[in-house]
Image: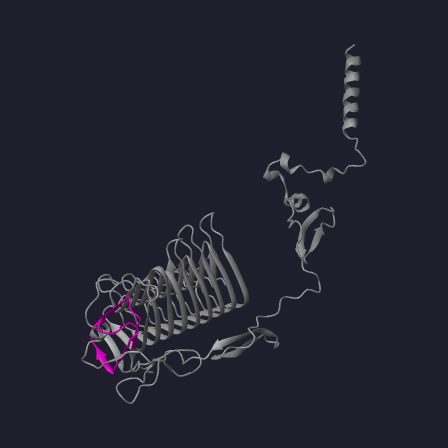
Amino acid sequence: MSYLKTFFLICLILFCAACSEKKDPGIDDEAIVDTDAVSDDEVTDDDLLKYGPEPPDWGECTGIWEQKEQFNEETGRLEARWCEPPENWRPAAPPDWGDCPEGWEEKTDKDEEGNLLAKYCEPVLPPDGTECEPGYFTMFGSTECQPIGDPCPEGEFAEIPNDAGTEIIYVSEGQSIQDAIDNAKDGAVIAIGKGTFDEFITINDRNITLWGACVEETTIKSSITGESHFDGIINVVSQDATKKVTVKNLTVTGRRTGIYIGGSSNAVLEKLAVHKAVGYGIFAFSEKRANIEISNVSVKETLSREEDSTRGIGIIIRDNINAKMNRVSVEKNRMVGIVAVSFSSATQVKIEGKDIVVKNTMPRESDNNWGRGFLLEDNVEANFENVLIEKSRQTGLSLISSTPGTKVVFEASRLIIRDTSSQESDKQYGSGIEIQNNVEASLSKIIVERNRNYGISAGTFDNSSILKLDITDGVIRGTESQESDKNNGSG
């Protein structure tokens, strides 16, 4: 009986073994690898090569791009799916700025084979490092410094057209400009002779023109320190939006803000040198809507405030201002060259400009931070053409919306930003263009070169911001790393 049981047990073992060796002819054992059922250590490199991980897949192709696929020759498994332009597609034409405006000259870049890489325009300027004499400034169109205003007359006063009914009051050196203003009729012209006038003056709710003999030889200089940025050497303060003040053909300098424009004042500033003022060169602020025109003006070497060693800003346009700028040179100021800012969604700066030079903006003295060339912040709408921003510290051009509900809209054509260095305090930053948060920027015909950290840096820091950036005919090149840690250096 024991032999019989042993026999049946042996047969059962042989039968089970035979069953386990049967194969489905349609299934290849080597094709079954369940990588999810085993640990990473049990999956060999060959398994991953043949069967996993999931292949790259770009999804649906858009536009003229065509879908491409690659399969493993041995297994037939999809290895990648991507998109490519058609074979006859060629990159867009190289940047081409077309005809250059007056004061600019055509330049081209080509590769080693002579193929055109870019056609653009460069401004004609005095050689780097040129120091202009009093009455002259750096402006497009000449390799020499150009006169800011009219030539100096042979006599004491400029030749002023004597329109019927216009009162002209002549003020010689040693006399008071303020006294002449106080005694003038509405609409009068105050003719200021050659010489230096040590005073600060205020014009309230009047139509008045201050007309100097010439920039080189007529200077209003205040030796009395101002207590705040509202204390200018020339102060234009009006609550009557129908009034306008014109200041022309002279130099402004001294221990106060150069020119302060406040209230609802309308002002025309032309053919002026605002040099070595304190705190601000030109400060324009309006509680209501006002119009400011700045043309053929040099703002240079604005000094920091004595009490805290801050500011030193060239031009600030703030809140409800419509501003027009033409042929404006802003050099060797501190903290920021030009600022346009409106901190509330209830106010807005609108500014347009042509032929603008911003060079060598220095950091503020208190901590060696900043040194931005051009800053537009919060509720600002701006349109510029023919702009050079060169040798700033920290940032060349900043477009920043930092207050909820505000937006910066910026359009520019023929914009060159170059040679921005890292800020002096910590050797960080140095970008050509910085764009933050709720900003809409359209940049056409631009060169961003030889800056640090980033050529263009753009990003949002909250979920509600929408940043739109459009660049056409742009050249971005030669970006170096920031000085502090040698990081970045991206275009």
| Number of marks in the rendered image | 0
Where residue 460 appears, x then y in whole percent? 46, 52
- Residue 315 image-quadrant placement: bottom left
Is residue 186 within the magenta segment? yes
Quadrant where the image shows the N terminus: top right
Where residue 391 appears, x then y in whole percent? 39, 70
**Magenta stretch bounds:** 182-210
Q: Is residue 174 above or below residue 402?
A: below
- Residue 160 image-quadrant placement: bottom left
Q: Nearer the viewer, residue 294 or 418?
A: 294
Direction bottom: furthest residue: 154
Direction top: furthest residue: 1
Color encoding of the figure? one colour
Q: Nearer the viewer, residue 210 or 17?
A: 210
- Residue 119 image-quadrant placement: bottom right
Direction right: furthest residue: 25
Q: Is residue 393 visible?
A: no
Is residue 239 within the magenta segment? no
Residue at 46% over, 54% down: 438
